[in-house]
Image (spheres, grey):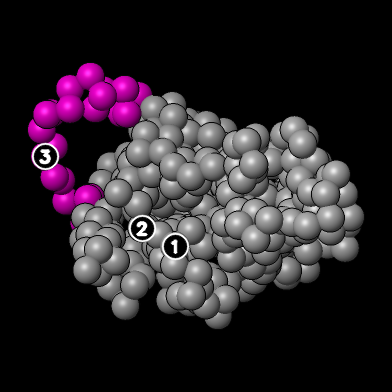
Amino acid sequence: MFLRNVWYVAGFSADLPPGGRVGRKLLGEPVVLFRTAGGTLGALEDRCCHRAMPLSEGHVNGEIIRCCYHGLEFNTTGACTRVPGQDRVPRQAAVRSYPVVELDAVIWIWMGDASKADPAQVPRHPWHDDSKWSWRGVYDHLDAGWELLVDNLMDLTHLAYVHAGTIGGNAEMHFRTPTHVFREGNKVKVTRHMPDSIPPRTYIDAAGFDGLIDRWQEVEFQPLVVRVNTGASVAGRGALQGNRDGAFSMVVLHGVTPETEKSTHYIWSIATNATIAPSITATVFDQVAATIKEDRAVLEAQQRCIDASPGGRFVDMPGDIGSNQTRRLLRALLEAECQ
């Protein structure tokens, strides 16, 4: 089952220039996203109501998207505005439309009850619009279920082994660091502070650390995105108490958008204040992309193993506290939707 009455990341604004279109399966439903010549976004059922041709196979012309089979034209509300060869458009000629919002350079879509779609509830990500930060957005496809991805992001103890060559650092410190979990309404927050740490490779390359650092990992889950705020400062300068002036920071937005029960649109961005030189910024982006690739390999291996042994046992560990709290929140939200 999927949670439907929440905002999902559908892509980045730059992914859809005027006249652009893309077809994706979201929560098991085929959807075409497009932008009109005037800049208006549309999200429609990717199925022409005439003979079931995917509208994503057509093209955008002005303010409509045209089916490539018989030329029916649809506006961003899903109404058919023209049928070639006849003056009258049949009253039932329409396709479902989905609410979409564009905010902070992100395209958000609501897959549930349209009457409940409140744009004010879209998760904000101001780092995309802050001139002090550089950012890059990436679309990845994951052959694994969305819940596995959420578990991975809410439990950062895996950094020690999965990402040993980039952002990992000392394995023993990762597993001995206390994990604090807080639930605030529909949000779960995980905080991990690691004073006097040996800097991992990415941190050395980005900030030139040559001694011990004070390192933080602050994760926030809000259906259905995960924001990871992480970084470090020279040890003893008060970064873990909130004084982060001059510290190296990264903020990663993870859009977790189910495609099917066993595949996920993984739409993420990395923002960093390490903008001293273009080469350093590129290094940070490239190394974070490498960690995402490592995560993808792990998650897809997990999914294959689960598929091969669906009755397999899971044993919880102390580091699972964040992911377990998140799963409890999601279960409660799903139960509320089903009532």
Location of residue 232 with respect to 51 vertically, above or below: below
Spatial separation of the CA atoms under disc 3 and disc 1: 34 Å
Q: Which mark is residue 31?
A: none
The answer to whether residue 32 of the structure is visible from this angle is: yes
Residue 106 in the image, given as x and y percentages of width and height = 65, 60
Q: Secondary structure at mark 1?
A: loop
Name the amino acid, label 2.
Leu
Q: Are marks 3 and 1 in contact (CB under 8 Å)?
A: no
Which one is nearer the viewer's eye here, 133 or 225?
225
Tell whether position 316 is magenta.
yes
Q: Secondary structure at mark 3?
A: loop
Q: Which residue was labeled with disc 3?
A: 315
Is 57 situated left or right of 9 in this image? right
Spatial separation of the CA atoms under disc 2 and disc 1: 8 Å
Spatial separation of the CA atoms under disc 3 and disc 2: 25 Å
Name the amino acid, label 1.
Gly
Residue 83 in the image, given as x and y percentages of width and height = 79, 48
The residue lying at 48 percent from left, 58 percent from top is 111
Residue 155 in the image, given as x and y percentages of width and height = 32, 50
Q: Which mark is residue 112?
A: 1
Q: Which residue was labeled with disc 2?
A: 3
Magenta segment:
301-321
